[in-house]
Amino acid sequence: MKEQPFPYLEPRGFSRPIPLERWLPDCPVGVIDQYLYQRQNEAGWVLDPFGANPLLDLEAAHSQRVLAAINNPVLVFLLRMLAHPREKREFVSIISRLASQSRGQERLELHLKRLYQTRCQNCRSEVQVEGYLWQRGSDQPFAKLYTCPSCGDTGERPVTEEDLQILEPLRRGEALHRGRALARVLQGSELDRETVSDALKVYQSRPLYVLFTLLNKIEGMIWEEGERELADAIMISLLEAGTSLFTWPLTNNAPHLLNVPQIFFERNLWSELERCIDLWSQPAPQVEIKFWPELLEKKGICLFTGPIRNLKSLPDEVQITSLLCLPPRPSQSFWTLSALWSAWLWGKETAKTFTQVLDRRRFDWHWHSRALQQAFAHSVKLQAPPGEVYLQISEVNANMIFATFAAAAQAGLLLKGCAYQSVEKPVQSIWQKNERNLVPVLSPAAYSLAAHAMRSFLLERGEPCEFSRLYTVALTEWARKGHLSLPIAEFDQEKSSEIQMGVEKLFTDHESFRRYDASSQELDSGKWGLVDWEGAQTVLDDRIETAINELLQKTNSLPSLSIRQALNQQFTDCLTPASPEIEEILVSYANWQDAELAWRLHENELQANRLADLKEMKRLLQQLAPRLGYETREEEICLWQEGKRVAYCFFLSTQANLSTAIDAWTGREGVPVFLFPGSRAKLLYQKMMRDGRLRERSSGWQLVKFRALRALAAQSDLNRATWAMGLGNDPIEEAATTQLRIFG
């Protein structure tokens, strides 16, 4: 029996940027809201057992009572601050108080700004740097970045002796500051000295001095109610900004390990202090928060501070109907930094349950899968029957997908649906308790089942796909059938590796699968397809193009979200189309209207106009044939014959569906010619660039734009030689080098 389709839930609404966002699993706005709306279980509670991103809990709390278990004190604090956003003026007041504190004989603001002061290389004016560039392992920066307000000079400039003189006193006193930072975490214990000392290496001498100067001032000041948490919020942003973990050129990717990049960027922390308040003071609806065991009477968040395993039982009035699971990835960097920041801000005792992560030396995928399994298993026990689990995997790679699927299955869950959009977007899935008591069988037959699912998927898709998508298809088949539900006692490191290698070995079956466009031996390089495509459906790219055209023909102006939602309903599960491919098609057919916030179909793409184009092309072919000594024969395609021999087969289309034309031509004779509008040239080129199979199959084809045929028909001295030459005079590659739309 075919499983019920699972449409991908498209994000909708304004995505709210939050502090520390680059360290957190992605939680696209509007997805949780849509899922809960579909469930319509207002009477129950939902449980977030991981507490990995506060945005999940805040969104769920708009319609539900949420029980969130958060073990990381930094994320507890972040959730509290985001649930009760403060105004910008309140943060400005805190900064003003800090700035006016004394450091020696000068204001603290002036003292700290001096540390980032330089001279403009052009006009010699004093200017604040944006930051410094360092080479890993070096004892001094090699460049600085600034924008001079006096002369406008901007960019990367070499550091000077004057810049290095500012740094020198800080380097001499570095051991003292580093020792104090270490002591605030250890507090007399020597157990974690090596780990903490290693972690402190991500802080250079200047940021370390600035951070602890500010921390010491904050601790010595007298604060009114609610003010200290504003200062702590600012410090969390600075503690992150002060690390040497910002690779240059800057990206938004957070490192998974505490490894300093080869080239890193040291930020101006006083500038960051002034800048971060915009992020903390964004206006947002307030959400009620209560701390367990105090319960909510209406929608909001009940916060359990600790790991979910410590929540032993629930009162009768707390009926958990859904689990909302957004697992973190094994991030040594963020967890270790969070332990340091918690100890520095609130003391080691406050962060006691979390600073235990400092003892851990291994953060491998097997350990992570076991940790996730424990959280899943305990959460399922707290859930009222029948119960449903929404599971979102934000980091799409084979290790994370396997670790999470295996953990869910071994916790007694059975997969009901899974939707994969792209490697850049989260995988969405629905699970339920395994009431069927399926017995896991990881036998040769189980691997054959996975291989069959992979082949069936590729035939349904009709074109190659990326490794992670096909890998997800294989694991989805197992998770649906219960084959991953091994007893946890049997799932050791060796068994985990054995299963993963078994799945990966399926890709090396060269009689079934082949790879296109690989640039390395890694499995995730290139795309994967079949050796034998017999029985394949029309390629997915062409079906998506047809669907978008039909949508725009019905309503020639549509918002992007409406288009995406309609496509997700039509192409479900792991066939969900990726955003770049959709946008490429839209650009070929429509214009984005800023005023309407919608895509509007080009006038020449109206069905009546395109039918007229096809009629014109057929007429021109009929007129050209006798001029070149051919006869025409009309079937579902247009043929030019010379006697009984077919010289040319013409496939006319208003779409970039070359694959469909190739399917129709297979087994015929004659030179195949694909005739299409010039406005479809760039789209056709893009399809060929991402589909190695299409490039192979189109070898020997003539790709001719409508306008090229018109130009040939207009030549009074046309002969077979000039005809053959003219067919290739307007290649599709030229369309890919320009953004100008060329109408067909």
Image (tube, rainbow, N blue to C red):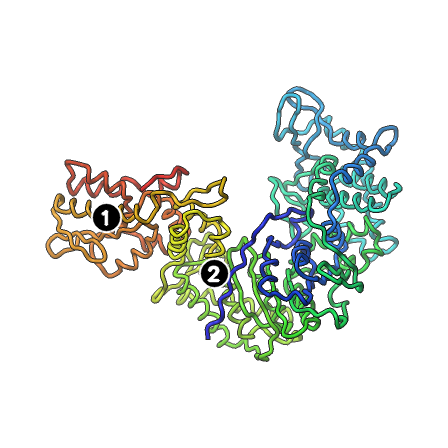
Residue 415 lies, in percent from the top left, at 56, 70
Q: Residue at x 24, y 61 (%)?
A: 667
Q: Residue at x 87, y 32 (%)?
A: 102
Residue 564 vs 293, above or below: the answer is: above
Tell me, for residue 615, which label it has, or none. 1
What crowding class fits label 2: few (fewer than 14 Cα within 10 Å), some (14-19), or many (20 or more)? some
Residue 166 vs 458, above or below: the answer is: above
Closer to the camera, 720 or 31? 31
User: Mark 1 is on which residue type?
Assistant: Lys
**Quarter of the image that includes the C terminus:** top left
Residue 311 lies, in percent from the top left, at 76, 68
Please say if the residues under marks 1 and 2 sit with CB atoms less than 8 Å apart: no
Residue 476 lies, in percent from the top left, at 52, 68
Tell me, for residue 569, which label it has, or none. 2
- Separation of residues labelled 1 and 2 (CA atoms): 34 Å
The secondary structure type at the circle numbered 1 is helix
Residue 658 lies, in percent from the top left, at 32, 53
Name the N-terminal-most of marks 1 and 2: 2
Tell me, for residue 65, which label it has, or none. none
User: Mark 2 is on which residue type?
Assistant: Gln
Name the side, left or right, on which 573 lies relative to 178.
Answer: left
The secondary structure type at the circle numbered 2 is helix
Camera sees residue 266 = yes
Quarter residue 112 falls in: top right
Q: Residue at x 84, y 30 (%)?
A: 107
